[in-house]
Amino acid sequence: MQITNFSVKNYQFTLILALLVAVVGVLTLFTMPRSEDPGTHPPQYLITVIYPGTSPKDMEEQVVKPIENKIYGLENIEKILTTVEDGVAAFQVKFKYGVDVDNKYQEISTEMNALKNSELPKDIYMIKTEKISSSDVKILQVALVSENASDKKLRDEADELKTKIEKITNLKDVKYSGIPEQEIRVDLNLEKLAQLKIPLNIVMGSLQSEAADIPGGSIDLDTKVFNVKTSGKFKNADDVANTVVYNANGKIIYMKDVAEVSYKSEVVNHITRINGHRCVLVTAGMKDNVNISDVQKQYLPIVAEFSKDLPPNIKLIKNFDQADMVSKRLGHLGFDFALAILLVVITLVPLGGRASLIVMISIPLSLALGLVAMNALGYSLNQLSIVGLVVALGLLVDDSIVVVENIERWLREGHSKMDAVLKGTKQIGIAVVGTTTTLVIAFLPLAFLPDMAGEFIRSLPMAVITSVLASMIVALTLVPFLGSRFLKTHEHGEGNIFLQYLQKFLTRAYRDIMPKALKFPKITIAISVFLSVIAFGLFSVTGFKLFPTSEKPMFLINIKMPLQANISESDRVTKIVEAELKNHKEIVYYTSNVGHGNPQIYYNVHPQDRKSDFAQVFVQLEDEATPTEKTALIKKLRDKFKTMPYAKVEVKDFEQGTPLEANIVVRIFGEDQAVLRKLSAQVESILRNQKGTVYINNELNTYKTDVKVKINKEKARTLGVLTSEVDKVIRLAVAGLTVGDYIDDRGDARNVTITLPRNKFSNLDALKNLYVNNVQGTPIALNQIASITFETAPTAINHFNKSPFSKVSAMTKDGYLANDLLVDIVPKLDKLKMPNGYYYKLSGEKESEGDALGGNFLSVIILSAFLFIAVLLLQFKTFKGIIIVLSIIPLGVLGGVLFLLATGNPMSLVSIIGFIGLSGIQVKNSLLLVDFTNQLRQEGKSIDEAIAIAGETRFLPVVLTSITAICGLIPLAVNPNPQISPLAIVLIGGLISSTILARIVTPVMYKLIPPSLEKSNGSIN
């Protein structure tokens, strides 16, 4: 081959290029971005609207419908999932993959701003638009703990730490949570306003006017420009208290005359504790494409220094640091990598010392070149890309082993060193290119897997593809060059003692089997077909789960209180849960969040927004805790909390892959809430009676009760009272109205809120003695024109693509798979008698599988299959050769599925990757046998003679490459991470069965359907 000739003859150039690759590879290894999980940027967005005190029905009418109509009109929209609860509406917006993520974010933000200024209520507390990204995960969570420090002191210390940390350029979204912000509260005396006949609008308008900060512009004085400073916004509570609210008949009324103005904490909506102690949480996220280890070196000194300067009654606890986990995980994989290299070195012994040395030099160079390519393509060093590199380690030595072994064989036959190098490489070169290409094509569909699952997994196949392509280049350039320098002509043709024993073992192993197999080819093939049928039949036994649970030593406990429980009651029950967790010594930290979810610490679990009847506990075990120990603790806690009388306590492990609310989710679509409620109850009964389900949730199994202010509109109109004024007064009394802000002593903007005198939380007393001004400004008592009643309302309203639905969800118990349970559940769902216009759809794992393995993936598989066949046709020029090569694939599947069953692993996305990669490896090995058989026949050998010689000659490198691959994969197979081990288990099982059976099936298939071969002087059949 020309590339080989050039590399050997221009060895100085080859040497310099090899050194360059080595140096750049090492630099890349240390400078590549590092993270725990691959970075994902799906075209998915979360819009959250918080409008406290608003019922789901009112939220649907006033907020949800305008937003859905606007978003649904955008281009390339795929789906909108809307969840509406008390005071909160959350919209999960997903666009078709391939759109520009940033442009769509700008589009949504623009539309939301336009809506905010036009169709949406003006007093909405917050509208937040977020991009869903893996970088949303908080890499650092620090707790400032104190039982007796004031709210202000804790808040100030947290704010100071936040200010220090957010100066690190590679960090983002640095926040503190768990303590209410300070505000200036204006407690109006409505009776006094009524006596003075001062309209409420006048009071609010005065405050809003004084709070406005309008720049005065600039003026020219001679040759200079001066800025004009205006009065500016409020500076403190005295500024608010001295605001003039009314001036009539020469009498000035100040705010302090009609209201109490003071500094107070906002309403408590998020309570945090760590190990039962009051605390404030400070969290930080990390920007994309950054090395987390480098970032850690920046924030650790800041945290350590800050801890020293804290007052004696405040303690700092760094309870979550993702950089430590990344370092541990990558370090573990690094150990696996080193162990794999050691095992590979041992397997190379039969090649001889010099040949082994050449292969060993080719390994780091191939990996270095692969790393450089991955970095150039924008991939980071994470758990999946490292797994890809470890998998590639077992494969990339194949090319070098095959080339070196062939050169060695030529040397053993007595050829000169240069002839052995050039002609030996040329003889095997086309086969090496063909086998590598087929292997790359086998992994190609995985690189184009659609949706978020594809983006998440992509770095694994890309690591394999880049490394294997790099190994082919190294095998055809550097290996021949090194061979021409280091290898020597053998004095004996049998190789070293290890090679001799291996050859004798292989000969002895097949000595009795091969003649019989070739004598009865049809029976042999019938047996292989039978084994193949068994292999594919066993898939139904393994079960299927797209992504496994996480092996990380942490999990969540969700506490779901009875409907409408207030935050005080949620806090009381959370303390009961904490008391139980305190008894388990294996738990290092348990961080409680009452009224809110824990800040995001896992890439696919987004925190619950404000919800008074919800609490979440983030539980962390020792770093060295195994997945088995964690699972045992989860089971123990589930049993303990199963009979909790005050709340539903769900102990949930983290799941890998795409975000899931539950393993099994049934959505029932229809317009009438009453009908949906009836159907939901029936579905709930089906799930509850199914063995293997746990934590069944049905949002419509109970209704909640709302306080309804019923206005007598005729009477209100007679008295000249506008309905909007009534709503405004009620809002003022219950939740308060923000009329502006002020700058606190730390330079931060805080709210100025106007409300009525009340305790920490509003109660029914807030609706007593209220006055509403009519159009003439005369105060009218609210009880004259309105009455207070109670009414039932739905707890939550859900929309999917604007269609209303209810949902019933269930988690699966340990040892059960959702797909297996659905086999029993779906027929029961199909038997439900649903009215016209009502139907159900499965979500949860089923929907996730459909997104990950949908139509686009099938198209890529078909395209790859055609490419696969096209490459083999180029190699063999005949379909018979392709059939012979592909016939071995089912026998590899047999070993893979048997190993999955033996280890108790279900089929999963990583297992699928294993089987797809396995097909490429098998074809690679089979192709070597068939290609050499063809070469021997072209040299004039008979079919039987060619089959015998090729089997003896080529089976040795096939066995060597298989053994090296298996040894390289052993560390991954014993890795406790269920995201990694199934891949290695499939490959090892498949390689063992296909290597053993290929020696029988491939020669027999060749004898049954020998391909036609072209020769320069004619053709032979």
Image (cartoon, rainbow, N blue to C red):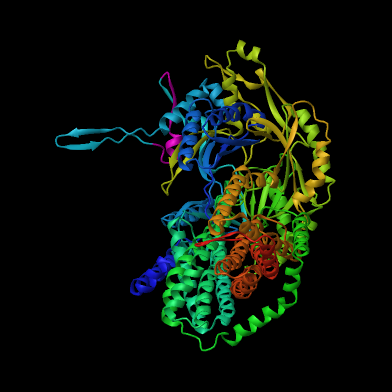
Q: Position of residue 362 (x, y in %)?
A: 47, 73
Taking 484 as reference, is 337 left or right?
A: right
Q: Is residue 606 above or below residue 63?
A: below
Task: Kindly indicate the quadrant of the structure image that contains residue 225.
Answer: top left
Taking 890 as reference, is 264 left or right?
A: left
- The residue at 80%/49% (across/down) is 645
- The residue at 50%/55% (across/down) is 284
Indicate yes or no whether the magenta region holds residue 234: yes
**Farthest left residue in view:** 222
Taking 474 as reference, is 541 left or right?
A: right
Q: Position of residue 357 (x, y in %)?
A: 49, 80
Q: Which contiguous range is marked in magenta?
A: 233-249
Looking at the image, which is closer to me, 366 or 472?
Answer: 472
Q: Position of residue 987 (x, y in %)?
A: 65, 65
Task: Kindly indicate the quadrant of the structure image that contains residue 547.
Answer: bottom right
Visible in this render: residue 311? no
Q: Quadrant of the N terminus?
A: bottom left
Looking at the image, which is closer to me, 316 or 28?
Answer: 28
Looking at the image, which is closer to me, 22 or 604?
Answer: 22
Q: How many numbered circles does the render carry? A: 0
- The residue at 36%/73% (across/down) is 9
